[in-house]
Amino acid sequence: MPEPSVRTFANLEELSLAAAREFARAASSHAGDKHLFSAALSGGSTPRRFFELLATAEFSRSIPWPRVHLFQVDERCVPPDSPQSNYKMIRESLLDGIGLPKANFHRMQAERPDRETAACEYEDDLRRTLAAPAPEWPRFDLIFLGLGEDGHTASLFPGTSALAEDRVAVCPNYVEKLKMWRMTLTLPVLNAGARVIFLVAGAEKKDLVRQLLRDPAAKPPLPSGLVKPALGSLEWYLDQAAASSLS
Ligand code: 6PG
């Protein structure tokens, strides 16, 4: 894997504009008649503005949405209309404003009581859509990740079982500290990505960013530090506050 690339922006607005520009450029250049453009989107709060901008005409009109397929990086095991739902945030900030065919957004049905079956069916759908039968790992064109204050990414939290998962692409994951179940893409899928972009904003993340970028060999490794796309690029989009410990 080449060295991670780091781009620093004045603020979250500029970071979000850059992410929207890059998504639109990549989607419009990759999605051809013969193949689709695939992206996996995280939840949380950081990407909301990115999604809102992507839904504006400035960006949306250049994207061939019928040839774009969007997946979720992870989801909380709550109903899709719950305020905690990542899908709800993505729907409100992006999906409701764009002409993406309904079948092209692949929602993680993490609210289902049988989480294992829901994860398995999501993996089947992912493998079918990206034409990646086992044992190949599905390779997203773009994966957008966030960084939690404990170093988690996706729903791969420190000390949780999903971190060691290397047999399946999607799995439920119980997070003791939150006393809640999540559903998440696993590290093999994240590390199979063609491009993985972390979107990180806020001074509360500056020390984590420094550790991840300046001391990546620190032990124990943080979950976000295990994201190393072997045959892809790892990119960091930081606002000045999150980057303020790097210099
Ligand atoms: C989630 C996210 C999670 C998020 C980080 C950062 O379900 O919460 O997918 O991995 O990216 O927790 O969240 P913020 O962007 O809100 O800081």
Image (spheres, grey):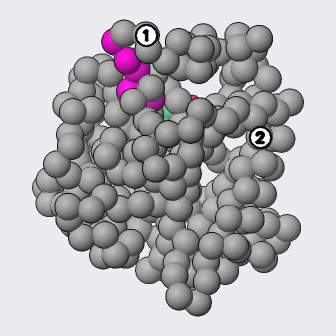
Quarter of the rendering containing residue 65: bottom right
Verify whether residue 101 appears in magenta.
no
Q: Which SS type dominates the magenta stretch?
A: loop
State whether label 2 is within 8 Å of ligand 1: no
Q: Is residue 61 above or below residue 224?
A: below
Q: Residue furthest toward the bottom?
A: 33
Residue at x 53%, y 12% (from the top left corner)? 215
The stretch in magenta equals 220-224
Residue at x 72%, y 65% (from the top left corner)? 24
Residue 59 location, x and y as percent?
A: 79, 67
Near-viewer residue (197 or 52): 197
Asked whether, in this view, residue 12 is left or right of residue 183, the answer is right
Residue 243 location, x and y as percent?
A: 72, 20
Label 1 crowd (10 A; few <14 / some 14-19 / many >=20): few
Asked whether, in this view, residue 76 is left or right of residue 93, the answer is left
Disc ID at residue 15? 2
Which is nearer the N-term, disc 1 or disc 2?
A: 2
Residue at x 38%, y 72% (from the top left corner)? 130
Q: Amino acid at mark 1?
A: Ala
Verify whether residue 223 appears in magenta.
yes
Q: Is residue 228 above or below residue 232?
A: above
Asked whether, in this view, residue 87 is left or right of residue 195, the answer is left
